[in-house]
């Protein structure tokens, strides 16, 4: 029977997007950082013994799950064949909103586009075109996004000022109101 | 009824209010009366009108008018002064309202069930870490071929003002010439011979939604009388209606519906 | 010794950020989709037997690693965004109508609910549970809505067929009779 702490560590590491520091895990699991490292080493050894296709690795920032290096050829195939090779119109629209309205939260993007943008923003972040640039000062402290250096490079421009100007479009009252409130997707 | 008015804003339309008035917990379901429902419904109207939402007010008024008609019909000493056509029309309206309440209640309960599923599923979070850095270099450049004007065009696309929403009219669904009795007669003439028919087959050729609802009510009526069984083999599958009664045993309770 | 295909599936699922369809895994692993499902079911059963803090779940048409529901108290503290806020009763009722009647127009939703549905449908689109799926061929070409893949994911079901049948929610005789009495249909 696995210990509660070990299981909780597995759960947290599974949903983490970045390496998790032992100090943070220690705090969440209410055990010592040294014990966290022990637990994670035991887990890593178990995965190895079971010949799993993933590893639990200690990297610079802490512990993280990753695919087993042996299986890189399959993951490469997944990257090449299983991922979209170009931006969908919907993704391009999301990117355009981030470019022109930055800094902007995902909820604001959703209000402007009228559809949920979480997955697209995640992909754009992962590919490095969009990055976190701050936190909304209001309640909830939503993550604010902006475009990256890479975005400008790939578009072949030096700065945002080189993008075609916004134009004199005036957004609808509803959109303006939602932007002013910061959120507003949840209250109907 | 004054004490109800303060709550009016929590009701999402007339069906919501009616369902609340009829089915609220503190009321014994067997002591419900039309008079009381009408009084309480009207008590809420002030609050609705005060919200200055013309569309919403109209929706409440349409239902209120039906309720008041029904109550007025009850206060008459007998059928002497009543035009038969008017009376039938009134009871058709009542049956339609009943069918719509049943439908609204069905979807409300379905919504609650979806919420329970979501609550349970919400205790588990998905992995979203995505590609490790060493694979990112392999990933195709999603911006290949995308130019600054493309980005600008995409922005213009999303920021263009939306066309005005189409006006939703509820009144066009009202007047359809079909009665519960006709619907029951039709079922009774077809089902015993066929044994089992799908609800789809029983409503074939009916184009108006209300005709289908009345047909559904007729099915419910026969079900209540124990003359048919209703089954559904799979989700979203056809409703199967099976005749289990004897041929002469029909229409015992139909006076419930034709007044 | 675990099979190469099972290990490769684990590796790919570890880097995926949405459910991976068996067809895609089948193509990458050069086995049949049915075999993919078998493999994933075996992996899921193994994690359960080993009492892991994560699960491999079949959701929204594909396979995905998720944290074990038991460990929600720990993961909650770790995840910054938290779970999406709850939907209002009006939004839930509308969501049910779209789920069970799709494809459906806003006007059709309004008829069932007895109240204008535009704002609620807009909210559900922004939340990503509902999306445009087509146009009514009739006059007016009303937009038709259906539920999204995210909807299935949020509910933790694999497909619409896994939702409880609508017939389960048709009110019982007692309620129907109460409604009849409320409308004065009992003793005329």
Image: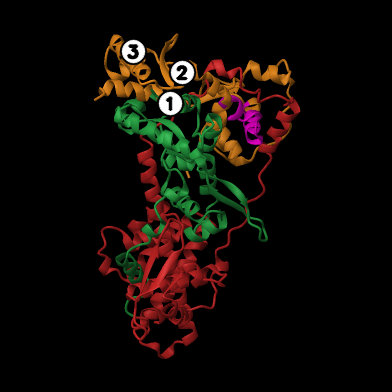
Chain colours: A orange, B red, C green
The residue under the point 43% across, 62% down is B103
In the picture, measured across the screen, residue B58 lies left or right of residue B195, that is right
* Mark 2 or mark 3, whichever is nearer to me: 2
Quarter of the C terminus of chain B within the rendering:
bottom left
In the figure, C60 relative to A57: above or below?
Answer: below
The residue under the point 50% across, 28% down is C16
Determine whether the residue tagged by mark 1 lies in a helix, strand or loop.
Answer: loop
Circles 3 and 1 in contact, beta carbons < 8 Å = no
- Tell me the chain of label 1: C
Cα separation between marks 3 and 1: 24 Å
Q: Which mark is residue C3?
A: 1
Q: Quadrant of residue B220?
A: bottom left
Same chain letter for marks 3 and 1 = no
Q: Which residue is mark 3?
A: A41
* Mark 3 or mark 1, whichever is nearer to me: 1
Q: Which residue is mark 2?
A: A68
Determine whether the residue tagged by mark 2 lies in a helix, strand or loop.
Answer: loop
User: Magenta region's main secondary structure?
Assistant: helix
In the figure, B227 relative to A114: above or below?
Answer: below
Question: Which of marks 3 and 2 precedes in the sequence?
Answer: 3
Camera-side residue: B248 or A152? B248
In the rendering, at what x and y percent does residue C150 appear? 49, 39
Cα separation between marks 2 and 1: 14 Å
- Crowd band around label 3 with a 10 angstrom C-alpha radius: few (<14), some (14–19), many (20+): some
Cα separation between marks 2 and 3: 16 Å
Same chain letter for marks 2 and 1 = no
Residues in magenta? Answer: A78-98
Determine whether the residue tagged by mark 3 lies in a helix, strand or loop.
Answer: helix
Camera-side residue: A36 or B152? A36
- Tell me the chain of label 3: A
- Tell me the chain of label 2: A
């Amino acid at each position: 029977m696995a210990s509660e702490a070990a299981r909780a560590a597995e759960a947290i590491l599974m949903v983490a997007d970045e390496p998790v520091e032992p100090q943070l895990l220690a705090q969440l699991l209410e055990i010592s950082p040294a014990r966290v490292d022990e637990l994670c080493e035991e887990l890593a050894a178990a995965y190895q013994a079971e010949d799993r296709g993933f590893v639990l690795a200690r990297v610079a920032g802490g512990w993280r799950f990753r695919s087993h290096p042996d299986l890189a050829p399959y993951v490469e195939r997944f990257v090449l064949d299983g991922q979209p090779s170009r931006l969908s119109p919907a993704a391009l629209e999301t990117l355009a909103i981030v470019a022109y309205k930055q800094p902007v939260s995902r909820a604001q993007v959703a209000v402007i586009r009228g559809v949920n943008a979480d997955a697209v923003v995640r992909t754009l972040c992962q590919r490095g075109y969009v990055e976190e640039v701050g936190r909304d000062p209001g309640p909830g402290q939503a993550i604010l996004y902006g475009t990256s250096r890479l975005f400008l490079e790939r578009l072949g421009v030096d700065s945002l000022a080189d993008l075609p100007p916004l134009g004199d479009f005036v957004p609808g009252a509803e959109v303006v109101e939602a932007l002013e409130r910061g959120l507003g997707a949840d209250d109907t | 009824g004054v004490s109800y008015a303060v709550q009016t804003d929590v009701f999402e339309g007339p069906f919501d209010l009616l369902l609340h008035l009829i089915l609220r917990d503190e009321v014994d379901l067997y002591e419900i009366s039309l008079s009381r429902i009408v009084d309480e419904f009207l008590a809420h109207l002030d609050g609705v009108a005060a919200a200055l939402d013309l569309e919403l007010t109209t929706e409440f008024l349409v239902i209120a008018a039906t309720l008041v008609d029904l109550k007025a019909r009850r206060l008459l000493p007998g059928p002497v002064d009543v035009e038969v056509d008017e009376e039938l029309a009134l009871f058709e309206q009542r049956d339609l309202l009943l069918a719509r309440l049943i439908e609204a209640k069905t979807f409300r309960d379905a919504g609650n069930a979806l919420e329970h599923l979501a609550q349970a599923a919400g205790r588990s979070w998905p992995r979203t870490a995505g590609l490790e850095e060493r694979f990112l270099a392999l990933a195709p450049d999603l911006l290949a071929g995308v130019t600054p004007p493309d980005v600008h065009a995409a922005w213009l696309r999303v920021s263009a003002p939306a066309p005005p929403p189409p006006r939703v009219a509820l009144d066009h669904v009202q007047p359809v010439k079909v009665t519960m009795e006709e619907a029951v007669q039709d079922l009774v003439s077809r089902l015993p011979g066929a044994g089992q028919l799908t609800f789809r087959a029983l409503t074939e050729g009916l184009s108006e939604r209300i005709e289908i609802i009345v047909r559904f009510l007729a099915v419910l009526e026969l079900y209540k009388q124990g003359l048919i069984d209703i089954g559904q083999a799979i989700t979203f599958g056809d409703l199967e209606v099976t005749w289990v009664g004897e041929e002469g045993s029909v229409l015992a309770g139909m006076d419930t519906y034709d007044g």
